[in-house]
Image: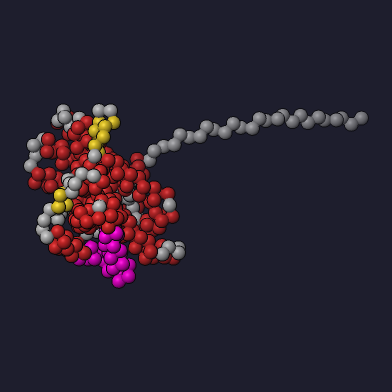
Amino acid sequence: MAETRETVVTATAPATPPPPAAKRINLGTLLREPLVGPLVALVIAIIVFSSISNSFLNPQNVSLILQQSVVVGILAVGQTLIILTAGIDLSIGAVAVFGTIVMAQTAGAGGPFLALGATLLVCVAFGAINGGLVTTLRLPPFIVTLGTFTAILAGTRLLAGSETYRVEPGPLTFLGTSFRIGSFSTTYGVVAMLLVYAVVWYALSQTAWGKHVYAVGGNPQSADLLGVKSGRVLFSVYLVTGVIAAIAAWAALGRIPNADPNAYQNANLETITAVVIGGTSLFGGRGGVGGTLVGMLIVAVLRNGLTQAGVDSLYQNIATGILVIVAVAVDQFARRRSR
């Protein structure tokens, strides 16, 4: 009689998967982020100056820093867009000053709202001229905007007759109106500046137009191969910059209700300083308005803190210049490491 053998199969429970490993933060990758360096620099500057002066972090002083940054801060948004496309705009400050003269003169003849509309049209027209010369004639943005800067500067003085125009309180000075949030007082100009940053940040990060801006600035040949109309994108960037210059002109009359043809002569360089310190690459395609906001705050905090410490303005300019050189050097280093 044959023996029957029973085979006993022992069921083995499936192995429990190991718990997911905790994500490790790569310090090198973190430091290569364009916004990290400027944020660290801003925090260090705030800590240093608050330890030197007890009044540095007072609400009144913080409000003053923000209010003094409004005009250049708004213009720096337009400069960021141009630099992201590997260009540079030396005329943006002159366009805004021209807009203040147009606004003041038109207000006397047709009222404040006509003045705002006329200023918008004029500033956008200057943007169209710059954009048309860059895209149609393929001229370098530096040369184009240097030429228009010189022409607009002379045109502003001719239009104003080298006179300063007083603007009556009303819609044209509205952005200079202050309001309080608890113990903190600020102006609608600061709110307008932050709104401009928010809108442009959204456009750059969340829309196809923003992706095209980065693509054109990073590698225009590859962008063309992908079907991006580089010329149209560039032209639209200069048009948007014109709109931003008009907003800055409105904010300028809110800060000081006088249209002065000699105002904001260094605004062009100050906007470039904020953009570069904020981590946006001069070679295009890298950075953004978040970094520009931080860069603008770094310059404002530096100037305010050094003033409170009794440092001469000439030394403040030296410190700002050194910051720009360091920022460009860091950008070059980051580009070499990314290759």
Q: Is residue 133 magenta?
A: yes
Q: Nearer the viewer, residue 252 or 51?
A: 252
Which residue is at a point 17% across and 45% down the rendered structure image? Answer: 256
Quadrant of the drawing holding the C terminus: bottom left
Which stretch appears magenta? 121-147
Residue 338 in view (yes/no): yes
**Residue nearest the observer in this picture, 220 or 289:** 289
Q: How many marks?
A: 0
Q: Which quarter of the rendered picture does the N terminus lie within?
A: top right
Return the x and y of residue 60 as percentages of the image width and height.
19, 32
Secondary structure character of the magenta stretch overall: helix
- Residue lying at 32% horizontally and 50% vertically, measured from the top left: 287
- Closer to us: 194 or 18: 194
Nearest to the observer: residue 166 or residue 50: 166
Question: Is residue 45 found left or right of 211 in the rendered image?
Answer: left
Which corner quadrant of the image does residue 223 belong to? Answer: bottom left
Report x, y in % for residue 68.
19, 42
Q: Residue visible at 22% across and 31% down?
A: 59
Across and down, in percent, residue 115 comes to 25, 54
- Can you tell which quarter of the image residue 193 is in? top left
Residue 264 visible in the displayed image: no
